[in-house]
């Protein structure tokens, strides 16, 4: 089985987010301070969560500068330290779960474990996005983040940008991996449909069966329905009503006889005696002698 696209996307974005957040946490580049009085014009201070560095064009960067303003004691810096470290730990845990869930070396991934890793990575992205946004909100507030007054200016440095990018990548990667819950939920629902119920289903009004009495049908309908020839019951002949009366005699059929001899005139040896003589009259016609 090919690795789903959402898993591949999550496995690519999450390590990139981890690398960016790790750089943002360790690098001293959350705030850039410059424009000091009685100092070289090119002097710049880079403030981070753990260190302060001094940089000039004519000199190399020097880290471990003293905190003369009480910068590391600010509440925003302390909270950012804790949340960023927690985010890094959660990201490492999420990547471990994602590796065990996706397992590209196997035939089929573990969708539930991959989805759980996505939730952990999404939470890690939120944990890193909160301190970065909070620090950026109070960047120029010298009461919250101590710094010298004007003409000293403060600017956003590269660590904040890396923190924003890393948090967004973790959110996207975690969301992609969390989509692995969809195939897992589909399998679970399909298994629940196929599994037989543990207890008989409680009857409702839609499943009540009523035994209605069978209607009295005619024998022709009752015993010759559905295209089947069923035998009639044995007592059907006994229950038939007897016929009333007696049979009437019928006359015997009479034979038909033709009075005319159809063979007359066909016998050569016999004189035609059956024909009437021409000397006597027949009926009411007159004879020739009378004429």
Image (spheres, rainbow, N blue to C red):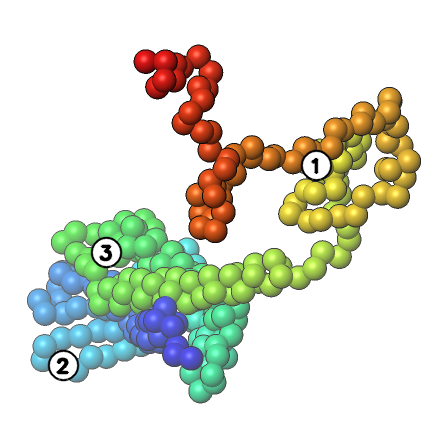
Q: Residue at x 9, y 80 (%)?
A: 58
Task: Tell me the mark number nearer the camera, choosing from 1 and 2.
Answer: 1
Q: Residue 122: horizontal and vertical position, in percent?
A: 42, 62
Query: Is 66 on the left or on the right of 251, as rendered?
Result: left
Identify the secondary structure beneath mark 1.
Answer: helix
* Residue ranking furthest to the bottom: 105
Instruction: First in sequence, mark 2 or 3: give its number.
Output: 2
Q: Residue at x 44, y 19 (%)?
A: 281
Q: Which mark is residue 221?
A: 1
State which quadrant residue 135 falls in.
bottom left
Query: Is 39 on the left or on the right of 179, as rendered?
Result: left
In the rendered image of this protein, does residue 68 appear above or below residue 106? above
Q: Residue 124: horizontal and vertical position, in percent?
A: 43, 64
Q: Which mark is residue 115?
A: none
> If the image is split into quadrants, where does the C terminus sit?
top left
Q: Residue 21: horizontal and vertical position, in percent?
A: 34, 70
Task: Give the crowd class for mark 2: few <14, some 14-19, many >=20 residues within 10 Å.
Answer: few
Identify the secondary structure beneath mark 3.
Answer: loop
Q: Which mark is residue 59?
A: 2
Query: Is 204 on the left or on the right of 194, as rendered?
Result: right
Instruction: First in sequence, mark 1 or 2: give its number.
Output: 2
Task: Give the crowd class for mark 1: few <14, some 14-19, many >=20 residues within 10 Å.
Answer: few
Q: Does the residue at mark 1 contact the one at mark 2 (Cβ under 8 Å)? A: no
Disc 1 versus disc 3: distance between alpha carbons?
Answer: 109 Å
Disc 1 versus disc 2: distance between alpha carbons?
Answer: 114 Å
In this figure, which residue is indicated by the disc labeled 3? Answer: 148
Instruction: First in sequence, mark 1 or 3: give its number.
Output: 3
């Amino acid at each position: 089985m090919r690795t789903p696209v959402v898993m591949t996307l999550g496995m690519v974005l999450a390590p990139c987010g981890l690398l960016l957040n790790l750089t943002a946490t360790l690098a001293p580049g959350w705030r850039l301070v410059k424009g000091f009085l009685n100092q070289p014009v090119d002097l710049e201070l880079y403030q981070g969560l753990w260190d302060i560095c001094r940089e000039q064009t004519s000199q190399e960067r020097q880290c471990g500068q003293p905190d003369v303003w009480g910068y590391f004691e600010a509440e925003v810096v302390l909270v950012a330290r804790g949340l960023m470290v927690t985010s890094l730990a959660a990201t490492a845990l999420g990547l471990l779960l994602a590796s065990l869930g996706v397992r590209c070396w196997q035939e089929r991934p573990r969708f539930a474990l991959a989805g759980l890793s996505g939730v952990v990575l999404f939470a890690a992205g939120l944990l890193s996005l909160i301190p970065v946004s909070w620090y950026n909100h109070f960047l120029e507030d010298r009461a919250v983040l101590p710094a010298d007054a004007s003409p000293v200016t403060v600017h956003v440095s590269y660590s904040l940008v890396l923190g924003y990018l890393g948090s967004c990548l973790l959110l996207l990667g975690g969301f992609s991996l969390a989509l692995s819950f969809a195939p897992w939920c589909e399998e679970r629902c399909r298994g629940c449909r196929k599994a037989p119920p543990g207890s008989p289903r409680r009857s409702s009004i839609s499943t009540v069966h009523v035994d209605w009495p069978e209607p009295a049908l005619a024998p022709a309908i009752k015993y010759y329905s559905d295209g089947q020839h069923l035998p009639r019951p044995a007592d059907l002949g006994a229950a038939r009503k007897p016929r009333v009366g007696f049979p009437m005699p019928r006359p015997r059929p009479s034979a038909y006889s033709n009075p005319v001899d159809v063979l007359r005139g066909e016998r050569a040896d016999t004189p035609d005696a059956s024909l009437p003589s021409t000397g006597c009259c027949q009926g009411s016609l007159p004879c020739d002698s009378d004429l």
